[in-house]
Amino acid sequence: MSIKKASSVSRRDFLKLAGTSVGGIVLAAAMPTVAQDVTPTATIPPTPLVDLLYLYPGTIQTDRLLVQDAMNEILRTRINATIRLNTIAYGDYEQRINLMNAAGEAYDLAFTASWINLYDINVSQGNFLAVDDLLQTVGRDVYASLPAGIWGAVRVGGQTYAVPNNNIMAFPGGFYVRKDHADNYGLDVTNINSYAETEAFLAAVKAGEGIAPIAANTDNPCGQLWSGPTGSDLVLGGPANAYTIMVDASGTVRSIAFDDAVFGNSVRLAHNWYLAGYYDTEIIPNEEEKALIRAGQKSIVYNVTTKPGAALEQKNDWGFDMYSHTIVPPTLTTGGVRATMTAIGANTISAEASMGYINEIHTNVELYNLLAKGIEGRHWVWDDQALKVIKFPDGVTAETSGYNPNSDWEFGDQFIAYYISPDQVGAWEETMRINSEAPVSAILGFSFNPEPVRTEIAQVQAVAGEVEVPLQRGMLDPETALPEFQANLRAAGIDTIVAEMQRQIDAWKQSGS
Amino acid sequence: MALIIKRGNHQSNEKLRRDIIHLILTAYSVICVLPFLLVISGSFSSEAGIAKSGYTLVPSEFSTSAYSYILKDPTQIIKAYGVSLSVTIVGSLLGLLFMSMLAFVLSRPQFKYRKALSFYVFFTMFFNGGLVPWYILIVRYLHLKDTFLILFLPLLIIPWYVLILRTSFAQLPEELLEAARLDGASEWRIFHQIVVPLSTPVLATVGLFCVLTFWNDWWLALLFINNRDLVPLQYLLHEITVNINFMAANPQTTGITMPVLPVRMAMAVLAIGPIALIFPLVQRYFVRGITLGALK
């Protein structure tokens, strides 16, 4: 960086000067080399330099302090702030943050989502700062960079408490299949319009390879074959849960378990496939399933997110070349938008500097890629600079790299990330297109308050927990098991939950109009 | 004659019986060792090998990938070993000192506030203020977050161990202590010259408990440690576990193909290593201490 080069004055003295005097103008005058870096939109708040604490889940990277220093070189000149990266292990993240919130410990920026460090709950507890005003001033670039339609999904009570990271928000569904198997056993994925149409392929793989071809994964722990009807929003539960309560495109609430055309058909198909030996005969824990997949014992997984570039990601995961094919068109839902966001802590030392950071990480290509990919030359080198493709330096692999968080999606605007493979080129434009073209859920921005029906939810989850895995992967005969399951759900109070959700949605619509 | 023959019979019967018992116990011991061998063998297997043929006594496909994954950043592991070792040594010595002093006081019938103090100590076995107030106290008032102290301070007095020590001290003959007192020994002198030397079994037992407690603790680090230089081994391994579980579950974050199953085994090997070495050293006292507490 230019500061490093220019400083015969020590960096600290220089910063003291820049901090205590009047910011931009003095800075530019004293440091002509710096001035070139400062584009007209950069806002340098006239405050002393602040140090921001940023909490996010991840794996702790060996070289994180080098990356942090490099980021701070940029941030000092751009927003007169520095950042402290505090990576917390995924499994510990929520607990750490909960305690910090409870104790009133200050942090400036934190990762929040609909699945970890829950956004709703944080907002209701007052842990996050409302950022609507800041988005019009310091954060105007990031505000403009995100699709206008998504902000409704983040607002709670008319106010915005987090900035979504820009990446895939509307998730298309489909299946991944091993390329070699598909090619050898005559599966032309482009001709497939429903999961049932892959039956001939399953039979061929079963006969040719002697394996049970259907895999489960986390998106699809049960090997389930259904997905919500087009335009629907799965509000309570998820694609793996047999009781899932959804809101369809017309705004009507119902449970998937009673939808015979979707759920009933899927469990009947699964049962036939189970009898034919396409599923494992026993339920295998996730990580052992993974090991089987990597050992070449699996061929296809249904009902997964077929976002652009998924085949490439899955290649890493499976160890084989993959096809990814979309069956279910995407819908823009609240959960999708809230899947990855950055919030400003209520006790932040500087709301402006924090928003300044969010603004920079979404718009400054160099800064974002430092955080997401590491330092050029040390953690990556150009593969093709014109196409923005990078690769590991010679002698470095994903396993040995000192900085490879591999979680672009949690840091800012993924669409300014460098591609990590030539095959990935164009994936960001494609994803942006999906985000902007996807139909919007009828209840974008609604979040369900489960409190009034907590007992019923627990009962329903218990009832479903007993059978949802064997039922959805065909181990039970749907002729008897499905009606029994539906009767148990009714007895557990599913209708009460549906009615309560409908009531909340109606009230939410009323208040909105 | 008859008597001698009979005795001979008796002896060979005895011998046979002993042999049978030895045989049974040997078989049992082998069964006890098997899981450890499986863990060690699993840690040296490739993931595909485990997926295909399960855990075997001899790795079906030999691989050191699990160890190279965990040890890819050896400085962090070495540092963590250092932290764990110092916490264990300092914590166990101080803990044993404070707990035995406390237990001695509580075991003396002459001590006027014995009941009140006992209540104060043992009440905490059943009730506590809850996680959040405790966290707030330590972070906001004692300012112990990210310090070496916090890794052992909360575990220095463990009421259950105090109870064991007190029971043991209370069984020392009162006359002995009375005699010392008449000879003009102070309470302090009685404690360290009479009570402590007579109580080595229970002290060794509680000492071992302490070592295990401090060595195995990762909870305090989870709550209070951000500084990577203060991360103990168990927390580091805990972090690796939760992260590989998460990453195995989320394809978005992968891109690193991790040998998940062998890594777990390798971590178990790394975590139990030093403790497995300490255990035989104090085991003698350990057994005596347990029976001492239980029988009398």
Image (tube, coloured by chain):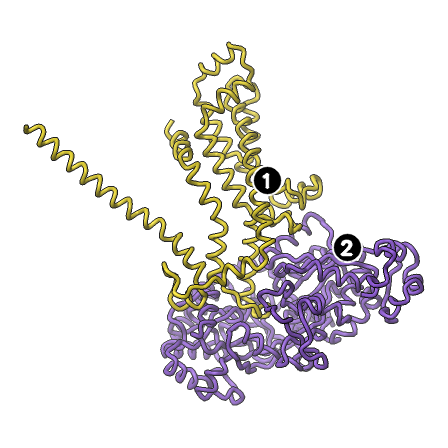
Image position of B291 with respect to A501: above or below: above
Q: Which residue is mark 1?
A: B152
> In the rendered image, what is the letter of the chain coloured purple?
A
Q: Which residue is mark 2?
A: A348
Identify residue type, mark 2.
Answer: Thr
Q: Is residue B101 above or below residue A10?
A: above
Residue at image location 48% in from the left, 22% down from the top: B195
Q: Percent x, y for residue B218?
A: 56, 48
Residue A488 drawn at (x, y percent) = 44, 65
* Residue at (50, 82) in percent of width and height: A179
Q: CA distance from mark 1 to mark 2?
A: 31 Å
With A459 as the anchor, is A138 left or right in this view? Answer: right
x, y percent for residue B273: 47, 48
Q: Along the line of sight, which residue is nearer the eye, A317 or A510?
A: A317
Q: Which mark is in front, 1 or 2? A: 1
Which image quarter holds the N terminus of chain B? Answer: top left
Name the amino acid, label 1. Answer: Phe
Residue A337 location in percent, x, y? Answer: 67, 71
Tell me the tag on residue A480.
Answer: none
